[in-house]
Image (cartoon, grey):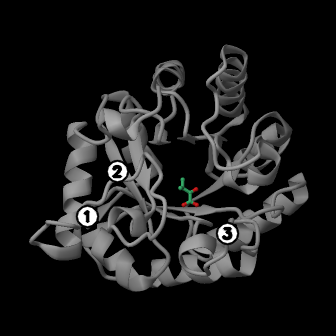
């Protein structure tokens, strides 16, 4: 059995080898992701959008996250390839340090090996508190969808040099507080590169350019299932693929590992 652990991912990062990440929310897709040998699987609160039909991730609850984490985890039982499992902590479930510990406990007991939190400086105490207690934390900076209302919409972050500097400093502080991984969303390629070059922990990008250690896409986006306006960073790997869903997942994996995805058209300058 190939079990991907945080050490596997740290080693890849140290050796300048890329790895892929994709979201999933149920057992059927977690089996397919395992079959495509994708290294990391994120049970994202994007399930609010793609499963529940909400406009944002804000309505998603901890109980719903734990339910979907459990479904994903059940789907992997007995499979040869075991991806590293990350779960999003939903809106306000980590507003205080104690709440963060209780919420992380629920998600880890449902099968998560790491929990992801959105935000910078205000989170540092919680990141330190949880990581000291053995919880793997993934930070999330740039466009943080849970704060969409205070950001004024789903828009690129870090274009202004002062804003870019703040994001870089927050990334360093999260690592220092104990975060073991970082997601960067919708930032200029140059900033994605600078942060990846500065940090020791693996950095996963989504609209953060080709230089991060990994890429993540929402599963339904990479399968071309999302209707309406398509974000710039999305690529449909299913249309035209004769091998179906597994073929699309493998094509995404191969493109991330080889560095052929993202292309310039998926990035922000
Ligand atoms: O919820 C999610 O799917 C995410 C990824 C898009 C990074 O946070």
| Image location of residue 163, percent across then percent down | 71, 23
Within-10-Å neighbours for mark 1: few <14, some 14–19, many 20+: many
Work out how far the residue at label 3 is from the one at label 2, CA to CA, in angstroms. Answer: 27 Å
Q: Is residue 11 above or below residue 154?
A: above
Q: Going by the image, does 218 lie left or right of 51?
A: left
The residue that disc 2 covers is 20
For ligand 1, tell me if the residue under mark 1 lies within 8 Å.
no
The mark lying in front, picked from 2 and 1, is 1
Q: Give the residue drawn at x 32%, y 78%.
A: 31
Residue 77 shows in this picture: no
**Mark nearer the N terminus (3 vs 2):** 2
The mark lying in front, picked from 1 and 3, is 3
Task: Label 2, secondary structure: give it.
Answer: strand
User: 25 or 128, which is in the foreground?
Assistant: 25
Q: Going by the image, does 161 lie left or right of 91?
A: left
**Mark nearer the N terminus (1 vs 3):** 3
Q: Give the residue drawn at x 69%, y 65%.
A: 56
Work out how far the residue at label 1 is from the one at label 3, CA to CA, in angstroms. Answer: 26 Å
Q: In this view, does 258 lie above or below 64?
A: above
The residue that disc 1 covers is 249
* Quadrant housing residue 58: bottom right
Q: Going by the image, does 180 lie left or right of 3?
A: right
Within-10-Å neighbours for mark 3: few <14, some 14–19, many 20+: few
The residue that disc 3 covers is 55
User: 190 or 53, which is in the foreground?
Assistant: 53
């Amino acid at each position: 059995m190939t079990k991907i652990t945080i050490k596997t991912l740290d080693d890849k990062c140290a050796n300048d080898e890329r790895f892929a990440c994709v979201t999933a929310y149920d057992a059927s897709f977690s089996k397919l992701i395992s079959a495509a040998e994708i290294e990391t699987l994120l049970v994202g609160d994007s399930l609010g959008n793609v499963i529940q039909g909400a406009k944002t991730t804000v309505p998603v609850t901890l109980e719903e996250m734990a339910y979907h984490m459990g479904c994903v985890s059940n789907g992997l039982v007995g499979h040869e390839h075991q991806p590293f499992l990350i779960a999003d902590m939903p809106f306000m479930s980590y507003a205080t340090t104690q709440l963060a510990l209780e919420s992380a406990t629920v998600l880890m007991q449902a099968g998560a090996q790491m929990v992801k939190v959105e935000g910078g400086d205000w989170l540092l105490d919680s990141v330190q508190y949880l990581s000291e207690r053995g919880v793997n934390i993934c930070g999330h900076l740039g466009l943080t969808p849970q704060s969409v209302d205070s950001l004024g919409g789903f828009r690129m972050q870090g274009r202004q040099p002062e804003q870019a500097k703040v994001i870089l400093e927050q990334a360093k502080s999260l690592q220092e507080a104990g975060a073991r991984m970082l997601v960067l969303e919708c930032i200029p390629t140059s900033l994605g590169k600078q942060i990846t070059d500065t940090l020791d922990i693996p950095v996963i990008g989504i609209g953060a350019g080709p230089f991060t250690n990994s890429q993540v896409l929402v599963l339904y986006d990479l399968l071309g299932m999302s209707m309406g306006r398509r974000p710039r960073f999305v690529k449909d790997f299913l249309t035209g693929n004769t091998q179906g869903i597994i073929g699309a997942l493998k094509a995404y994996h191969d493109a991330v590992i080889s560095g052929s995805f993202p292309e310039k058209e998926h990035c922000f300058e």
